[in-house]
Amino acid sequence: MGVPALSPKDQRGFRGSADASSAGFDAVDLKLLELVQTEGRITLSELGRRVSMSPAAVGERIRRLEANGTITGYTARVSPERLGYGIQAFVRLSPHGGITLCHFRTQELIHRPEILEVHHVIGEDCWILKIAVRNTGHLEELLEQLSSLGRTTTSIVLSSPVERSILLPPAP
């Protein structure tokens, strides 16, 4: 019934598999991953209380999950609206021939503060960008600049009923 828990001194490395058991995750690791994704500011003491381990043992497990690349960072989520960005949108971009993500014009644009995410995808379009802009005038200005790279298709976000889900390894 799953992989037995390893003591904090046992070494386990991520082997690149999507299977939770072969990746070395046990029930405690999975619970810790769930907790840090839902409550990013939770203390080691509280984590330990919730998984019935000492804060030191939990800290070792968290460090191991960071070291093997499972936990890639910690961040605060902010409200774009509270910062003055009233419109969020997804822009699909099909670049002109010869324009890549490494192209200097592309780099200038994707490092603008309005560009929240950039995804290189397979399909009709090559890139999907998530953007936040102040208003329609700001959207028009940004789209004009992005259109210099290629054909754009824009979808304005009305609402986001699921903004971020907890991600755990797939069940075996």
Image (cartoon, rainbow, N blue to C red):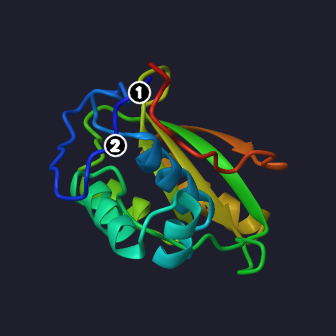
Query: Which residue is nearer to you in this view: 46 or 79?
Result: 46
Residue 104 placement (x, y as % from top left): 25, 58
Type of amino acid at the residue the image marks with label 2: Ala
Quarter of the image with the C terminus is top left
Q: Quadrant of residue 79?
A: bottom right
Residue 114 placement (x, y as % from top left): 56, 67
Secondary structure at badge 2 equals loop
Measuring 52% from the left and 67% from the top, which residue is drawn there? 47
Mark 1: give few (<14), some (14-19) or many (20+) Cα within 10 Å: few
Q: Quadrant of residue 82?
A: bottom right
Is label 2 in contact with label 1 (beta carbons under 8 Å)? no
Mark 2: give few (<14), some (14-19) or many (20+) Cα within 10 Å: few
Measuring 44% from the left and 23% from the top, which residue is drawn there? 1
Residue 23 placement (x, y as % from top left): 28, 34
Residue 122 placement (x, y as % from top left): 41, 23
For label 2, the residue is 5
Instruction: Report the side of 44 relative to 160 (left or right).
Output: left
Type of amino acid at the residue the image marks with label 1: Gly
Measuring 31% from the left and 31% from the top, which residue is drawn there? 97
Res. 71 visible in picture: yes
Report the Cα–Cα distance between label 2 and label 1: 9 Å
115 over 6 or under it: above or below = below
Can you name the residue that lies furthest to the right here?
A: 158
For label 1, the residue is 2
70 over 171 or under it: above or below = below
Q: Quadrant of residue 121?
A: top left
Secondary structure at badge 1 equals loop
